[in-house]
Amino acid sequence: MSVTPRRTFPPVITASDWGSVFGAAFKTAANRRKRGVAPDGWTMVPRLTNGEVIQVIMGWLAADPSVKAAWPLWYQFAAVAYGWNPTTQRMVTTPKQRDALYPSDLMHELWMSQDALAYDLDKRGITSPRLDLDGSFDDVTMQGAVAAALAEDGGALTWGAPKPTRKATVKPKATAPKADNGLGLALVLGAAWLMFGKQSRRYRRTRG
């Protein structure tokens, strides 16, 4: 029987702008979890479990309909949390996977991408800054959305949770990120650097 882990985040975070919402989420995580060193060797960021990462991603996706387009790497970050392995083409949705720490190589990139997303939402004047963090790692709708996005990107899945209802068209030109220890994360890391490197100067100034 699995034990529900202690919550890191409150159910809802609100603020006057999206940047402050992100900052509150970051500080909450930093106060409740040890910080880890990013690949650059000096930036300290809070570690999250895979379950907490899914909560955060679900919160941003629910924040505004434009987020999926503004944050195209959301499903790749989520796939790593679900332990997706392109070799076996399976996700891991067990309590053990939920409670394991998210890979340190990607934790910095995930925080940086959220900061860039918050900046983008503020810049575009998206109103009602609010992050609902009551999502669940076991949410089959979220799992299906990740599966559908991976299938569109060339990663067909066979796993225990319900598959997406719409038929996905496999495009073999792309490969989704690898998730288990020892597998490369170059796609996510490289894409995140290209997409968010310039936009996240504020992050490196204030959260390093």
Image: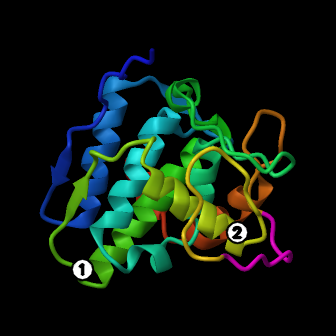
Give the secondary structure at mark 2.
helix
Residue displayed at 39% across by 17% down: 3
28 displayed left or right of 107: left
Label 2 neighbourhood size at 10 Å, few (<14), some (14-19), many (20+)? many
Task: Tell which of 84 and 189 is nearer to you.
Answer: 84
Residue identifier under label 1:
126
**First along the sequence among labels 1 and 2:** 1
Label 1 neighbourhood size at 10 Å, few (<14), some (14-19), many (20+)? some
Q: Is 147 drawn above or below residue 51 in the view shown?
A: below
Task: Name the spot of residue 52 as percent of width and height, x first.
Answer: 42, 38
Task: Name the spot of residue 109 as percent of width and height, x first.
Answer: 58, 52
96 displayed left or right of 136: right
Q: Amino acid at mark 1?
A: Ile
Q: Is 136 drawn above or below residue 168 in the view shown?
A: above
Q: Is 120 drawn above or below residue 131 in the view shown?
A: below
Task: Tell which of 184 and 1 is nearer to you.
Answer: 1
Task: Name the spot of residue 75 as percent of width and height, x first.
Answer: 57, 61
* Extent of the magenta region: 168-175
